Image (spheres, rainbow, N blue to C red):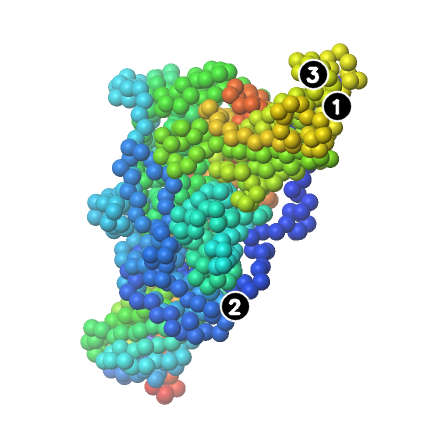
Amino acid sequence: MSATVAAPAPARVFGSGIRRREDPRLLTGTALYTGDFTLPGQTYAAILRSPHAHARIRKIDTARANAAPGVVAVFTGADSEGVLKPIPCAWLIPNSDLKTAPYRPMAKDVVRFVGDAVAVVVAESAHQAYDALELIDVDYTPLAAVVDPQKAAEAGAPQLHAEAPGNIAFHWTVAGGDIDAAFKAAGVIVRDRIVQQRLIPTAMEPRGAVAQYVRATGELTLWNTTQNPHIVRFIMSVVTGVPEDRLRVVAPEVGGGFGSKIPQIQGDFITAFCAMQLGRPVKWVETRSENYISTTHGRDHVQEVELAATRDGRILGLRATVWAGMGGYLSTAAPGIPTILHGLMLSGPYQIPAIKEDVFGVYTTTTPVEAYRGAGRPEATYMLERLIELLADEIKVDPVEVRRRNLIPPFENGHAVVTGLTYDSGNYPGALDKALAQVGYDNLRQEQAAARAKGRYIGIGVSTYVEICGLGPSQVAGAVGFQGGLWESAIVRFHPSGKVHVFVGISPHGQGEETTFAQIVADELGVAVTDVKIVHGDTDNTPMGWGTYGSRATAVGGAALAVTTRKIKEKARLLASHLLEAAVEDIEYAGGKFFVRGFPDRSKTIQDIALMANVAWNLPQGMEAGLEASSFYDPPNFTYPFGAHIAVVEVDPETGHVELKRYVAADDCGHQINPMIVEGQVHGGVAQGIGQALWEQAVYDPNGQLLTGSLTDYAIPRADVLPDMEVLSTVTPSPHHPLGVKGIGEAGTIASTAAVYNAVIDALEPFGVRTLQMPLTPERIWRAISQSASAGRKEA
Amino acid sequence: MDISGTYLFNAPPRQVWSLLMDTTAIARCVPGCRELRPVGPDRYETELSVAVAAISGDFKGTIELADKLPPQSYKLIVSGTGRPGFVRGTATITLAPHESGTAVQVAASANAGGLIARVGQRLLEGVARMMMDRFYQCLASQLDSGQG
């Protein structure tokens, strides 16, 4: 933005906004996605899905479908019963009375959401498979549906699973400090009932899989659009019985995930099952309409919250009850989202002496809910940021000032909050100040007052946030019931020519790690960034990794990479000392060269060393050949990025239309490897968060029919309705991370929903509107204004 | 989804009643109806082809007549399934003398599921109303043209 030219610093590739090497192939349409793979002899699967939200299957007649042209086979739940195991839930929250119920790859007796898989047709072409679906006759006895999580938890609600009485999947509590004392001492208490509406992730590429099973070897290969191929291999092995060493999972190009490609869904297992039954490759790719019912959704909380504070605006305590809809079954990571990733984050960037939250995970006759960008943290941030606004309104203090009175002061190495977490580092007032200065807050308030006098309704909305990223220490993962580790690994290999191959367990899908990881390696080793190739996504040629989600790819995978390159450097230094005939202590390394201290001409480039290590003609006693290293990095703590976002909107009182006038984001993700990619991540996240505030909502009718079943009715953000984003940053390195980075993938989504919502409510202040249900559609706003106008007339 | 309507027929209730019970006339007037096959007393199987917005497809279903009080009222219970999803509904039809003819009042409530609900829901009510209008207008016109 600024045109000021500073003295040229020595060019360092770490921290420079170089262009993404992924983009040329993505932008020219030459990248290969799962659906692009076609194998010899391939067949096509189409899945019959329940049109009922809840029903008993009385009979399935597949005879006509079986006889249809091109049909190779038709399978139902009865065929897969006993062959496939139920799909496991992989986040079993302890001390929560968790009740898992069997989640079959194909339903057998009862269907529990519109979209539950009932049968599959495999045919020579996709069209033949879809045509034959129409010929399957299923005789259903409809059962009562329930879509609202709070209602599903009430007595008398339709029951989904015998294993989970009252539809309660779990009841988890977080408590810290003396909450009763806080509310007793309160000078003011504010309350709200918040509905975090259900969202549909809408990745550009829907889910899909291509499975190939070689009977002669018993090997199963699965091309799968996933965020975590190694977890897919693990779970696929459990469900299909194919040993992990005979299972290869390839995540080719992946067209977006946002959490919806963490879980393994029915279609993945059905595809593998068909390939194994038939001995022929099988491809299944969702249609968009199928994607909307079969791939997981996000959010779906009903929150009843109250905040206790002093009359001068100091927060004393926060108490909440949350009903989190889980859908018909527990998806892979679902229970962890409204609990660990939500409840533990309820202190946000504020000093809150007492917190208590009860979270009920509730089965409903809807598509299963999973992580969706931000996953749990937007639901916590929104709760806090709304309550602060209500508090400010109640005590008539500027909402920014109320935030200031409660923000945790800057800290560099550890701050404990009452929920039990220890934040790594933070400067929350710093980020807030930066955003306020950029937007010109004080002037803006004056402009707002002047505009109101002329009948124009401008609103200013602020949201601060802190989030938990870089998941995480494996010991903690185990303690909170995550059925896996959360470390990452990397292999760095120098070829004789000095070029570098890097193999990572992380599986990027749009975040640009092929570029940023190369920047890390190039910076650490002093090689050209173009000499580093990042290999990922194929379980047969990459080391184990736990996936890309929770903004952990760089925070954990990047750390693994940094640690690995440092091992390489150590070995290279030993070899340099041998070749230069100098003591190791006297060898220095800079700019890709090892040299003897004081004698810069007595040097070997890292490429010289790589060659000598690979040919192994002259190695020191005991040194192994090759220049290669690997590491397993298990982080000592999570990372906690933070920031402050400010939205400026104008509401048209005649139509209820919201115009986004400005959007300022000040985020702190520690050191930035590539500021351009950071900015891009913020842009995408902010867009999705605004989507929740203003446009997006998955709507079910009372019978459990998804009414927003296509892009005609589900309103995702479009470029033409988004403002220019003013993206700023502060830098507070993580004290425990080898590179001081924190993670930026979800930040935008976490702050922007509350910022935009607060701005709209601020604009509506003259109408006395204090709370509205998201999304803030023109109709809802117009109705609220109209009601307030008619109430005003009555009073007058 | 609840829809209702009133249709005027130029004939006394008894004549309209027999028209409403005439399967040939019904089959002719239900839009997209390919077949109406009696399978028991007051019970028929039917094949319909229906289009709602971008969704079209064949429905197989049953139609049942119940609570018959000739020539005053009866109940229609309809259920159909097909590739686009399913439809279930009941309608109460009441006949009353109106001037020299008959006013036929229809009060129906229906549920739809599957693709037709997911993608076509915003047009569903309009399509249902249109089909109902066309059905009764068609029957009324048969009466006018002496076919009934």
Q: Is residue A619 visible?
A: yes
**What label does residue A124 carry, if any?**
2
Q: Which three-letter amino acid code belongs to the residue tagged 1?
A: Lys
Secondary structure beneath disc 1? Answer: strand
Label 3 to label 1, Cα distance in Å? Answer: 10 Å
The answer to whether marks 1 and 2 mark residues whose Cβ atoms lie closer than 8 Å is no
For this orientation, the residue located farthest to the bottom is B146
For this orientation, the residue located farthest to the top is A598
Disc tally is 3
* Chain of the residue under the numbered disc 2 shown in the image: A
Q: Which residue is mark 3?
A: A587
Secondary structure beneath disc 2? Answer: loop
Q: Nearer the viewer, residue A560 or A111?
A: A560
Which of the two marks, 3 or 2, is nearer to us in this view?
A: 3
* Chain of the residue under the numbered disc 1 shown in the image: A
Q: Earlier in the sequence, mark 3 or mark 2?
A: 2
Secondary structure beneath disc 3? Answer: strand
Answer with left or right where residue B90 lies relative to residue A352.
Answer: left
Residue drawn 40% across the image and 43% down it: A332
Q: Which three-letter amino acid code belongs to the residue tagged 3?
A: Ile
The answer to whether marks 3 and 2 mark residues whose Cβ atoms lie closer than 8 Å is no
Q: Which residue is mark 1?
A: A604
Q: Earlier in the sequence, mark 1 or mark 2?
A: 2
For this orientation, the residue located farthest to the right is A601
Residue drawn 66% across the image and 51% down it: A30
Residue drawn 21% across the image and 78% down it: B70
Q: Which three-letter amino acid code belongs to the residue tagged 2?
A: Glu
Q: Count neighbours of disc 2 (C-alpha within 10 A) and say few if under 14, some if 14 to 19, many if 20 or more.
A: some
Q: To which quarter of the image does residue A505 belong? A: top right
